[in-house]
Amino acid sequence: MILAHTAPSTKRFPNIYWSLDVAHNPVSEPAQNASSTKTVNLLAVSDCPITLQKIGQIGEKRGWHVLEAASLRQAWAALLRDQVNVVITDEELPGGTWRDVLSETTSHPAEPAVLVLARSLRDPLWEEVLRHGGIDVLACPLDEHDLEQAVLSAAKEARHPECSGLAALRTAVAANR
């Protein structure tokens, strides 16, 4: 049985965290504490040095391995070169958009989870990101707690997409359009 609960929300949109109910499914893993998750290999894609610096500082505090790319071309090179399980990308980039980044990650062997950074949160953007396979939309300027929760949720999604329930959520969002 899959259980969902909502953690503290990002500005307007809730991050949804999923776990398996061990009592009803004894072969499943118990839900892990966020601090016990495996190492996060994060690719931050932004042409804003302040955004890259903030993500790097937060990642360093958490023990994440953070790579940086300032353009779509640099993001593609990093995805080819490095094992990445989470990508955070600006909505607009030199050479493309978040859609291009998401498209590239779906053909990547590790299929990293994608978070989109938006200057202003809009329901249509959030729905479109989910519909295309992204995980969440975060508001800029970044809130440290929101970023941490979204990245840990995305890392879990990247490792266990069949258990997360986000695929069902994306399907429901798409069906309600």
Image (cartoon, rainbow, N blue to C red):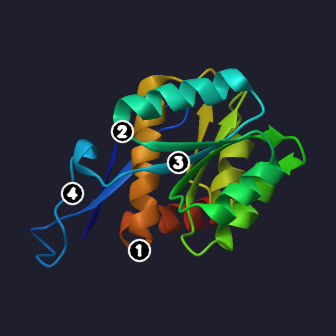
In this picture, is 126 found above or below 11? below
Quadrant for residue 23, please give it: bottom left
In the image, residue 65 lies at what x, y percent?
46, 45
Residue bearing mark 3 = 42
* Mark linked to residue 31: 4
In the image, residue 129 lies at what x, y percent?
68, 52
Report, in whole angstroms, how far the alpha carbon at label 4 lies from the one at label 1: 14 Å
Report, in whole angstroms, how far the alpha carbon at label 3 lies from the one at label 2: 11 Å
In this picture, is 159 found above or below 68? below
Q: At x 68% / y 66%, what residue is drawn? A: 80
Say if residue 125 shows up in the picture.
yes
Quadrant for residue 177, please give it: bottom right
Point out the frontmost of discs 4 and 2: 2
Are there few (<14), some (14-19), or many (20+) residues within 10 Å of tag 4?
Answer: few
Which amino acid type corresponds to the residue marked 3 in the rendered image?
Answer: Leu
Report, in whole angstroms, how far the alpha carbon at label 1 lies from the one at label 3: 21 Å
Q: Element at badge 3? A: strand
Q: Element at badge 2? A: loop
First of labels 4, 3 by sequence position:
4
Report, in whole angstroms, how far the alpha carbon at label 4 lies from the one at label 3: 22 Å
Are there few (<14), some (14-19), or many (20+) residues within 10 Å of tag 3?
Answer: many
**Camera-side residue of 28 and 126:** 28
Residue bearing mark 2 = 63
First of labels 3, 2 by sequence position:
3
Which amino acid type corresponds to the residue marked 2 in the rendered image?
Answer: Gly
Q: Element at badge 1? A: helix
Q: Are marks 2 and 1 in contact (CB under 8 Å)?
A: no
* Mark linked to residue 162: 1
In the image, residue 167 lies at what x, y percent?
51, 67
In the image, residue 62 lies at what x, y percent?
36, 35
Q: Would residue 168 appear left or right of 5 to someone viewing this image?
A: right
